[in-house]
Image (cartoon, rainbow, N blue to C red):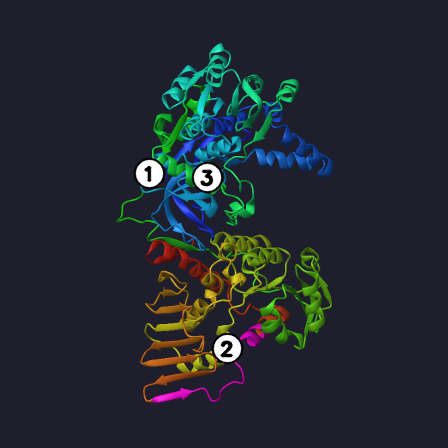
Amino acid sequence: MKQVVQNYKSGELALLDVPVPGCKPGGVLVRTAYSLISTGTELMKVSEAGMSMLGKARSRPDQVAKVVQSVATNGVPATYRKVMGKLDSYTPLGYSLCGVVEQVGDGIDDVKAGDLVACAGNEHALHAELNWVPKNLYAPVPDSLGPRHAAFGTVGSIALQGVRQGESRLGEVALVVGLGLIGQLVAQLLTASGVRVVGADPDPARCELAERLGAAACGDPASPAVESAVAELTDGHGVDQVYLAAGGGSNQPVELAARLCRDRGRVVDIGKCRLDLPWNAYYEKELDVRFSRSYGPGRYDPEYEIEGRDYPIGYVRWTERRNMACFLDLVARGRVDVEPLITRTADFDDAVETYRRLKDGELKAVAVLFRYPEQVAEDGPSAHAPVMSVPAVPGGARSSAPVRAARTPVRLAFVGAGNYATSMLLPHLAQRDGVELSTVVTTTALSAANAQRKFGFREATTDLDAVLGDASVDAVFVVTRHSSHAELTRKALLAGKAVFVEKPLALTQEELAGVLDAVEESGNDRLQVGFNRRFAPLLQEAGKRFGARTGPASLRYLVNAGRLDHGSWYLQQGTEGSRFAGEGGHFVDTASWLLGADPVSVYALAPSGNEDLQVVLGYPDGSTATISYVTTGAAGFPKETLDLVADGKVLRLDDFVRSSVYDGRKRWVSSRLPKARDKGQSAELAAFVRAVRTGGPMPVPLRSLVATTTATLAVRAALAGGAPVTLAEAR
């Protein structure tokens, strides 16, 4: 896809080909229809990039202070490399757009593919053909509002937040200093709320536009016209509020505010202008100076913007998302008119030339829109019939571990000691010959101490780095919450450790790519994911009895997952992914192992109103596997039942307590019921420890782990697109 980028060191602007962002949980992938250039904020950034290094330093004293601190901490050479590396890289532009939802991430239920949304954020609503946008940074567009006008949603919410900070009341008089894009919107919002507006701007065209859109009077701040209008409208008392929507280095706006504001009036800073407050003037009137922080409450709070944690409406009525929705509603109902603000609509392919004309002053504009190409034809490739690349396994990774000293125990460290680790893994390892439980790492000291006491770990700590740096540790078990698996695995691989990570390996394609990058960088492919069911004794024996196939097979896997208890962290889909993303790899891996191949396509359906899934996997020889993952079944019914049919034979598995194979007239049934369900954890751990001890291959090839993870992630894309996802091997 294409995206507008800028090199801050050289000032170069480019329309760059970049990868399509993945659709992560807690957000949506949006195909842009229109994006809006902020002729104030963005042009200031573009102009700064064209300055000399000294000019950049003068314009950003806050960054200079960070550089000075870095020099004191890291020295001049390291700081220089860091600063130059950051400057000499492409950065994005844009923060206000409207587009169509192309794909819905896990945890999103308020929009669906095909819906129109307005999007915000200088990291998420970029001038790019596709953007991933978290939940609290988009708002559904009312049916009566088109994408061209909905693209103003972000700048509109900035203006709306400024008006809210002024606490204007019906019948008051306000002064708006600066009638650029934000100032024009502030003036309209105030007028719509019953406030009479006086505007101040040196550009006569902008003054005329504001008056046409409802302002009582406008004029050059250096002329007596503005002061006369204020005196007339306020009986000489002065305005109730002043909104500073101007930029630049002049101190004139704050001086004008002091002169024309009434006693105990309010001054609200929205733009980035010079603020050398004349002390006597502000003191004598006891003026209330306020700042408006961008779109509203939630801005710059990662828990709100990225993790999607909303503020309760009873405590915070107008968050940045609710501000955006409110502004869109006002435009849809005709209370605010943005069409007259649009100076030019440019094709996205002309983005670089449009910025040049704006920067050089050749194009004078209040608002400029980029119009994006139409989506590909319905009969061509589209996001509704996507192709997902199965990442290639690095070829330079080693297949065996370094030679270990003879007869020394395999030393294991555990990162995480929750219920699964302490009930399903550690009991099998604690008494195993040739194994030493070296260190347990948890985020809380008490849980580490409990695991040490119960299972005999030599050490307990909360310091992960110390464990990764311990040369005596042979392997690291990652048994933490799903959202941390990929990053912890990556770190352990880079530290040269063999890694056993509980499923899932990754929650996104980006996380999976990060793990494989670590394999390539370190040359360490010593990785096992906790796909234990292929190691279950009953399934192993049944597979041998079933024997080899000559034709395609049909496999049905019913997973009666049941409902989760309220408060379970599995329900935190915004951070931990969906339930299927978390444990679906178990069933994909089992099916692929029985069929002897990796899947090449994924199709999924989900009934509305619950988490039930029907997942159909296609295999190279025409075999299919249908996984019915249901949460609405009876609690007393077995959790997992599986049937494999091929060549006139049937294999049946009943919840890991009984297995059968039917072959014509013959029937084989497992000879005895095990004392407890054995889903293969003990055999899997034995195979992993043996591989670490001997340096032999890992129990499951890395290629298979990657294919299973990719297929599991593809379920989300298949649900969003409503069509099969082809799993194409990366070239």
In three-dimensional space, the C-alpha distance between marks 2 and 3, rounded to whole angstroms, equals: 54 Å
User: Label 2 amino acid?
Assistant: Ala
Hey, which residue is sitting farthest left in the picture? 379
Please provide the residue range marked out in magenta: 666-686
Label 1 sits on residue: 145
Label 3 sits on residue: 323
533 shown above or below 112? below
Q: Is residue 497 left or right of residue 5?
A: right
Hey, which residue is sitting farthest top in the picture? 224
Residue 351 x %, y %: 40, 30
Question: Mark 2 or 1 closer to N-term?
Answer: 1
Other residues around mark 2 within 10 Å, as few (<14) / some (14–19) / many (≥20): some
Pointers 3 and 1 in contact (C-beta within 8 Å): no
In three-dimensional space, the C-alpha distance between marks 2 and 1, rounded to whole angstroms, equals: 57 Å
Label 2 sits on residue: 536
Other residues around mark 3 within 10 Å, as few (<14) / some (14–19) / many (≥20): many
